Image (tube, rainbow, N blue to C red):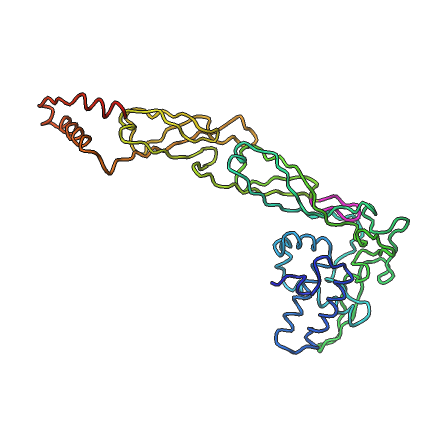
Amino acid sequence: MADYYDLLGVSRDADSDTLKRAYRRLARQYHPDINKDPGAEDRFKEIGRAYEVLSDPQTRGRYDQFGEAGLGGAAGMPDMGDMGGFADLFETFFSGFGGSGGGRSRRGGPQQGDDLRYDLKIEFEQAVFGQEREIKVPHLETCDVCSGSGAKAGSGPTTCTTCGGVGQVRRATRTPFGSFTQVAECPNCDGNGQVIADPCGSCGGKGVHQVRKKLRINIPAGVDTGTRLRVAGEGNAGLRGGPSGDLYVFLTVKNHSKLRRDGLTVLSEVNVSYLQAILGDIIEVDTVDGITSLEIPAGTQPNAVLILENKGIPKLGNPVARGNQCISVNVKLPTRISMEERGLLEDLAGHHSAKGKQHHHHNSGLFARLFGNK
């Protein structure tokens, strides 16, 4: 789907009058009854859909912020674009009749603002221990010049003369199958039943305008990819005194280079030599708390799992309770050994065989040097 602004041939800061003029011009150009070129009807539908979205400040705000994805289910509803384009053309061709959809009731009362989604990517450590973050969210706010009324100071809304305050108009349409009457939203007042005769210069009579607001949000300890944080009242402003929507922050946690997460458990691996596994050792390992000492017990087997208690993920909502870190031990065997090491190992192999145990060897000093130094 092409960009809606490009479809209408207007800039991204075009006002409502510019949008309407561009739509009417293109709708006449591509209307199937006028333009018989292949693809004209599809183009006509696309133009209708673009104007339907951009002519409403709330859907326009969502489109500016998120594109098609921000329009939610409405973007996939059948014939939405056809309805908007078809209905508004009546205003173009038949002097004042039209609308952006049929059968909707008057919207004169308060209307709650839309909820917004904000996707935030955070580091592994930030998800473990939490953090306060500052984000910038574009959303609709109540116009502070007119306090959301949409009218200039000293004036107010008046009853729409086109629909008599009902918010709907009826129109008769002739077809090859006969005439039928359709009820549609009043094009003059957009279904509100009232019009702003002297609109506010700051918001163009909409009562809201889009701003980019800085917010400080608290990311609690223990969050994970897919965690959704709700920030009440920070969505789009409501219309005509309605409450604001909420902001939902969806988190994605970046991968760690050495640590993995399984619920509250942190998983990692360490490599030790065969001598360290046989004789034991104390090594340093990475944890979410930083570098920590880990004891490799003597006789540790390959793929053994060692536990560091309370080095895992804090429980979301109860950070005092933490999981453990499970460390898998990889025992690395040498691919090359020196002649001295080979002799000692062969002696050791003989020592552990039935035959070798019958002979006394004289290499205890070399064994001590090789195995004592690990």
Residue 197 on the magenta span: no
**Which image quadrant for residue 15?**
bottom right
Query: In the image, what residue occupies the spot 20% across and 30% down?
Result: 341
Question: Residue 87: image x %, image y %?
Answer: 74, 66
Question: Residue 202: image x %, image y %?
Answer: 81, 51
**Which image quadrant for residue 192?**
bottom right
Picture quarter with the C terminus: top left
**Residue sitting nearer the eye, 59 or 356:** 356
**Residue sitting nearer the eye, 4 or 373:** 373
Question: Residue 70: image x %, image y %?
Answer: 63, 53
Picture quarter with the N terminus: bottom right
**Which image quadrant for residue 246?**
top right
Decide if residue 149 is on the left or right side of residue 215.
Answer: right
**Residue sitting nearer the eye, 104 or 204:** 204
Count of picture labels: 0
Give, as a single range, the part of the protein colored magenta: 235-244
User: Furthest-right residue in view?
Assistant: 154
Query: In the image, what residue occupies the spot 63% across and 58% down?
Result: 75
In the rendered image, the vertical position of residue 2 relative to residue 145, given as above or below: below
User: Furthest-front residue in view?
Assistant: 339
Most common SS among magenta residues: loop
Question: Residue 328: image x %, image y %?
Answer: 36, 33
